[in-house]
């Protein structure tokens, strides 16, 4: 049975930002594109972080109430850094879960569920960003699964 691979459904040209991108611009990208996160890349295309809509909401909440519930697990220094961040590089998560392009779609979905993320960077050697998986990509895979009757896609695993 042939398994559908991540490279077959990923967005091969995801919108990205650099560490110097303003958070205002990140918000515009997330809203305009209808996505929940954006990869942060170096000038060489290497994945260095991720900014999510959730982080932006937490930042806003911290600015309103520094003792807010979403921040209770953070140190004072981390709360202050989040509240005062102005660029993607200052807010981004660097502890990332990624998937290689040769992974199967069920493996990627399992990772996404396990780590509670709705977008997954697809990386190659040296953390070079090759693409990303977003919810519409998973819908496309599900459609393919239904179109093929589930046979040979690996999605029935």
Image (spheres, rainbow, N blue to C red):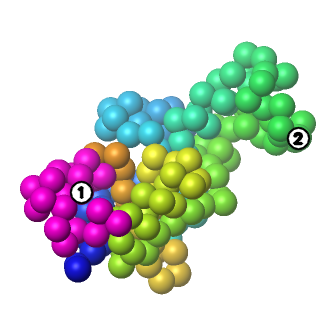
Residue 6: tell me if it is visible.
no
Label 2 element class: loop
Observer-side mark, 2 or 1, equals 1
Residue at point 78%, 40% (across, down): 81
The residue wearing badge 1 is 141
Place residue 65 in its image quadrant.
top right
Left or right of 143, for residue 38: right
Q: Residue 129 location, x and y as percent?
A: 43, 69
Mark toward the start of the polypeptide (2 vs 1): 2
Q: Looking at the image, which is closer to me, 48 or 106?
A: 106
Structural crowding at the residue carrying mark 1, measured as other residues with C-alpha within 10 Å and reported as few (<14), some (14–19) or many (≥20):
many
Label 1 element class: helix
Residue 36: tell me if it is visible.
yes
Residue at point 51%, 66% (across, down): 98
Q: Residue 14 location, x and y as percent?
A: 34, 56
Left or right of 139, for residue 54: right
**Range of the magenta residues?**
137-157
Residue at the farthest right position? 76
Q: CA distance from mark 2 to mark 1?
A: 41 Å
Structural crowding at the residue carrying mark 2, measured as other residues with C-alpha within 10 Å and reported as few (<14), some (14–19) or many (≥20):
few
90 part of magenta stretch: no
The residue wearing badge 2 is 75
Q: Residue 51 location, x and y as percent?
A: 55, 46
Quadrant (top left, top right, bottom left, bottom right) of the N terminus: bottom left
Query: Which numbered tag is attached to residue 21?
Result: none
Q: Looking at the image, which is closer to me, 30 or 150?
A: 150
Residue at the farthest bottom position? 125
Q: Residue 11 location, x and y as percent?
A: 29, 59
Above or below residue 66? Residue 24 is below
Above or below residue 28? Residue 157 is below
Quadrant (top left, top right, bottom left, bottom right) of the C terminus: bottom left
Left or right of 144, for residue 53: right
């Amino acid at each position: 049975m042939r398994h559908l691979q991540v490279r077959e459904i990923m967005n091969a040209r995801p919108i990205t930002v650099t560490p110097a991108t303003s958070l205002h611009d990140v918000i515009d990208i997330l809203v305009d594109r209808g996505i929940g996160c954006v990869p942060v890349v170096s000038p060489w295309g290497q994945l260095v972080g991720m900014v999510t809509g959730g982080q932006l909401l937490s930042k806003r909440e911290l600015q309103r109430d520094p003792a807010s519930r979403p921040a209770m697990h953070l140190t004072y220094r981390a709360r202050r850094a989040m509240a005062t961040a102005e660029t993607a590089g200052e807010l981004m998560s660097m502890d990332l879960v990624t998937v290689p392009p040769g992974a199967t779609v069920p493996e990627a979905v399992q990772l996404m569920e396990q780590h509670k993320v709705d977008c997954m960077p697809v990386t190659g050697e040296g953390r070079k960003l090759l693409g990303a998986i977003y919810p519409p990509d998973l819908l496309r895979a599900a459609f393919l699964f239904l179109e093929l009757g589930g046979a040979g896609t690996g999605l029935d695993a």
